Amino acid sequence: RNRALRYNGIMLETKQEAENVLKEVHSGRDFMSLAKGRSVHRESGEQGGDVGGYHLKDNVYPAIAEPLFKLKVGEITEPIRMTFKGKPHYAIFQVSDEMPVKRSTAGSKVQEEVFGIKRAERYMIVLDSLRTLHHPVINSDFVDWLVSTAESENNDLFVQSKNEIPKILCQLKTSSISIEKFLETARQMHIGLNEIADRDRLEYLITDIVIPAHLFEIEARTLNLHENTAFRSKVSMKRDDMLLNVLREKFVDSKISASDLEAKNFYDANPIKFMTPLKTEIVEILVETEELAQHLFLEISNGAKPDSIAKIHTIREGAAHHDGRLSISIFTKAYYQDIFDAAQTTEIGEIVGPFKVSSGYSIFQVLERMQELKPFNASSKKRAKAYVKIDKSKRGYVSYVRKLREKHGVEIFQDVFEKTL
């Protein structure tokens, strides 16, 4: 977590295709050129596979982060299995650049991870004690029945279970878990028949999901936690929120759609929502002493090239091999907090400094400032449709509530309301 990475990716439909492209890269082919021609993820492919910006490890999908953050700049991952448009794909990633991260930036994430580890350890200790106390025993015959029934094309397992004599899937000392109870949980978790037909997956669901949930429910009821007033109040509020969401989804959101034309019209009418973040390119020289900073400032003011001076003098980690060039944007603000505001407001060409920062004294020159309208492609169209749907949903919900008021004859007693306030 001591660095943020910028990386490029190439996504292919099969593992064999990914391995073939990987061989081409290792043989000397340019990664970004291959991304433009081969990647099925067109949005990044058009940019040579560049995913854009610098990313902390905790903000990257774990399946990518684990192998990626072990690499040096220029190195490439082995093919990684991913899901794209609902189907399995394989991708390879190349680290294109890195940026050091202050310990304070990653500190909270480390604390969260340590807390998560300790909580998981405590969870397992409690679960093991409950398993010992209640001794759950799984009926393997009914596991076989679930697998075979789920595999059958002629039976609907979720319907059939309701018509069967209750089957005990798991027996505990003082209670049991029926097949119907298991399937009710499966429905709530959106578990499909294909998962139940997979015996290994089914045993995992029973052993690691359903049984622990049942054991913790028993313990909670034993401690009368379900009778706790504050808890019951929270459950009631949560229930009301869920009912409202279901009602809105059924009678408002499910009837809303957005056409390509509506998306394009929204894109044209609201260009500000599709602009790239403001990015300022600077050359910075960071040094330890104010005296050296003043001396270098005079040299630059007298015509010396900032990039040449930065290459020799800057102490900002990772910046020397870029000749002091930094990209300042909302995505990199966490790394350049000391100079962010000044960099974003200084006129192009102006030399700023020296001024005190946490690591020394900084001088920089603003080279250029960029903010562009993103093209109307698949990504921006998807985003525009989301905006259209949100707007329709808001107006649709207001209309729906108005009809409910008329239906139920709602009347507000203003005098009582004012007294209450």
Image (cartoon, grey):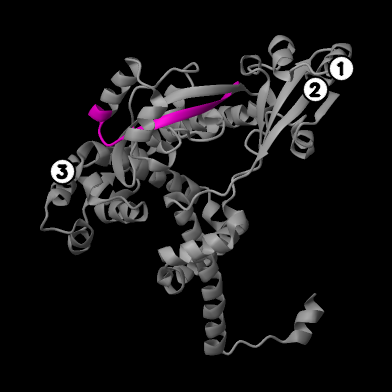
At 32% from the left and 22% from the top, the residue drawn is 22
Q: CA distance from mark 2 to mark 1?
A: 11 Å
- The disc, 3 or 2, on the residue closer to the chain's N-terminal end is 3
Q: Which residue is mark 2?
A: 363
Return the x and y of residue 72 as percentages of the image width and height: 49, 16
What range is drawn magenta here? 1-17
Q: CA distance from mark 1 to mark 3?
A: 82 Å
Q: Which residue is mark 1?
A: 298
- The type of residue carrying mark 1 is Leu
Return the x and y of residue 347 as percentages of the image width and height: 78, 37
**Residue 48 part of the magenta-drawn span:** no
Label 2 vs label 1, nearer the camera: 1
Q: Quadrant of residue 166?
A: bottom left
Label 1 vs label 3, nearer the camera: 1
Q: Which residue is mark 3?
A: 144
Front in this rendered view, residue 336 or 261: 261
Return the x and y of residue 179 as percentages of the image width and height: 25, 52
Judge the density around disc 2: few (<14), some (14-19), many (≥20) Cα neighbours within 10 Å. many
Q: Is residue 250 left or right of residue 402?
A: left
Judge the density around disc 1: few (<14), some (14-19), many (≥20) Cα neighbours within 10 Å. few
